[in-house]
Amino acid sequence: MDDPARSAGGTLGEYAYQASRERPIAEVVRDIIANVQDMVRSEVRLAKAEIKEEASKTAQGAAYLAVGGMLALYAVGFVLVAIAQMLDLVMPAWAAALLVAVLLGITAAVLVGKGRERLHVPAPEKTIESVKENVEWMKNQTRS
């Protein structure tokens, strides 16, 4: 059979190539189940692709954050040493270091708390929308 859809790798069910005739209910149900399985497989592939794309973007952003964070850590360390040395002029060295450490600990606790509040994992929006459309389509098919 010289059909362009088949030679192009199309995945239409066999019923698309049969002459119009009454089909048994079992055959229709079998085709519907096969189509649903294909849709589920497609949704899984879409979800994997979407998550892989998002993970790639996230990894690149994480690399920039890691380098920037490391440089910021060094900068903060030098600033803290400078503050402790300035405080050493007006109080004992141990008290200056303790004061800087306590203020730094309080600041760190506040920032960690705010970061935990804002942390969230993105959902694969395209896949969710597509699944909703497929569920609606399946409902319409069962009503027909």
Image: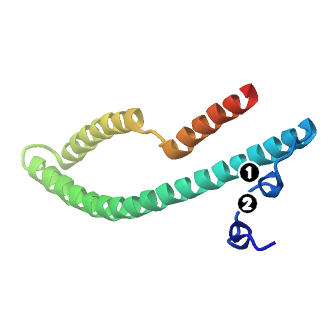
Q: Residue at x 73, y 70 (%)?
A: 3
46 is higher (above) or lower (below) than 133: below
Residue 23, quarter of the rendered image: top right
Q: Measured from the top left, where is residue 108 in percent x and y?
A: 32, 41
From the image, tell me which residue sits under label 2.
11
Give the colouring mode of the picture. Answer: rainbow
* Residue 6 in the figure: left or right of residue 18: left
Tag count: 2
From the image, tell me which residue sits under label 1.
38
Q: Measured from the top left, where is residue 56 in percent x and y?
A: 47, 62
Depth check: 39 or 122 in front? 39
* Residue 105 in the figure: left or right of residue 51: left
Classify 10 Å Cα crowding around label 1: few (below 14), some (14-19), many (20 and above): few
- Element carrying mark 1: helix
Depth check: 101 or 21 in front? 21
Cα separation, mark 1 vs mark 2, equals 9 Å
Q: Residue at x 67, y 71 (%)?
A: 8
14 is higher (above) or lower (below) than 90: below
> In the image, what residue type sits under mark 1?
Asp
Residue 30, quarter of the rendered image: top right
> In the image, what residue type sits under mark 2?
Thr
The answer to which of marks 1 and 2 sits earlier in the sequence is 2
- Element carrying mark 2: loop
Q: Measured from the top left, where is residue 135 in percent x and y?
A: 65, 34
Of circles 1 and 2, which is in front? 2
Depth check: 13 or 102 in front? 13
Looking at the image, the residue that sits furthest to the front is: 20
Q: Residue at x 54, y 53 (%)?
A: 51
Q: Measured from the top left, where is residue 50 in percent x and y?
A: 53, 54
